[in-house]
Amino acid sequence: MNFEILKNDFEEGILTVTINREKALNALNRQTMLEIRYLFEVYAPDLEGLKGVILTGAGTKAFVAGADIKEFTNLNAKTGAVFSKNGQDIYFLIENFPKPVIAAVNGYALGGGCELAMACHMRIAGEKARFGQPEVNLGIIAGYGGTQRLTQLVGKGKSMELNLTGDMIGAEEAYRIGLANHLVAQGEEVAKAKEIINKIGKKAPLAVAKAIDCINAHFNEGKAAYKKEYEHFGALIETEDTKEGVAAFIEKRTANFKGI
Ligand code: COA
């Protein structure tokens, strides 16, 4: 697939993906969603030496201002549900990606854009970032997981408030309530995300992947997540990387992990 909307830059093991529809505030039209699916299903998993992925928006105004509202006019009850489920499926690919995926939120993250940021493993907010689920203003609700992931991240009360009022919150409040992991000067979002991915890139890759899997399982599999945790723990303890990590600790040196 040729990327028409996404601009991808793969450098030193980090794939930085810019959603590039600046005139439409990077709203997610059909083509953008197809490209995001392909990116996480095929393109990124194939990249040799990939340490992690950063998602950001083109320009200085928006991360992503939502699903493309202009494509809503032809939807009916049946195609609307398919549209919503398709978005959810794509966002699960991001949530379940085995390497860190970080949203560098450089402006408006609204509706499907807020949901996209929440499907990522972490969010870095620039000072001008604005988050919200304004779907109630259109007569609909969040459809790409926003009622669920916002509740997971900020708790029921704040999620109710944001989903029911459609209000936007600024970067400082997003940071205060735990929606954003870090608050940085405007323009520094990608740099901060790179710093975190580079730090994680020095850890054992299999352990990182299993930690992501277990944390997601807490929300999607309930109590079974504890079983998953001890099973993954057991599998990891036999790996070459665990031998290396333990030996490095005892020998007082830095571990050199190989992902095996
Ligand atoms: N879908 C499609 N187009 C969108 C869009 C979206 N979600 N968000 C913004 N755009 C387009 C606007 O239609 C406008 O296009 P035009 O120049 O062809 O008219 C362009 O992006 C710039 O947006 P504009 O509204 O003029 O900018 P603003 O600074 O006045 O307002 C926002 C910015 C983000 C507050 C406003 O665009 C907005 O409310 N967008 C919709 C947010 C939303 O409801 N998202 C959830 C969708 S489910």
Image (cartoon, rainbow, N blue to C red):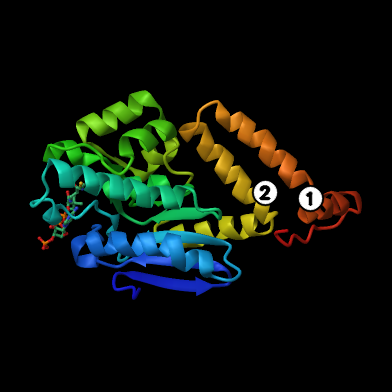
| Residue 188 in view, yes or no | no
The amino acid marked with disc number 1 is Thr
| Furthest residue in direction right, as rendered | 251
Q: Position of residue 29 (x, y in %)?
A: 22, 59
> In the rendered view, would you say 157 is above or below 69?
above
Q: Which residue was labeled with disc 1?
A: 242
| Furthest residue in direction bottom, as rendered | 2
Judged left or right of residue 153, residue 22 is left
Q: Are marks 1 and 2 in contact (CB under 8 Å)?
A: yes
Q: Position of residue 200 (x, y in %)?
A: 63, 55
- Label 2 secondary element: helix
Q: Position of residue 103 (x, y in %)?
A: 43, 54
Picture residue at 55% right of the left edge, 38% below the top: 215
| Residue 201 in view, yes or no | yes
The quadrant in which the C terminus is found is: bottom right
Q: Which residue was labeled with disc 2?
A: 207
The amino acid marked with disc number 2 is Ala
- Depth check, front residue: 36 or 51: 36
In the drawing, what numbered circle is on residue 7?
none
Q: Position of residue 19 (x, y in %)?
A: 32, 64
Picture residue at 61% right of the left edge, 69% below the top: 49
> In the rendered view, would you say 1 is above or below 148?
below
Judged left or right of residue 16, residue 57 is left
Decide which of tag 1 and tag 2 comes sooner along the chain: 2
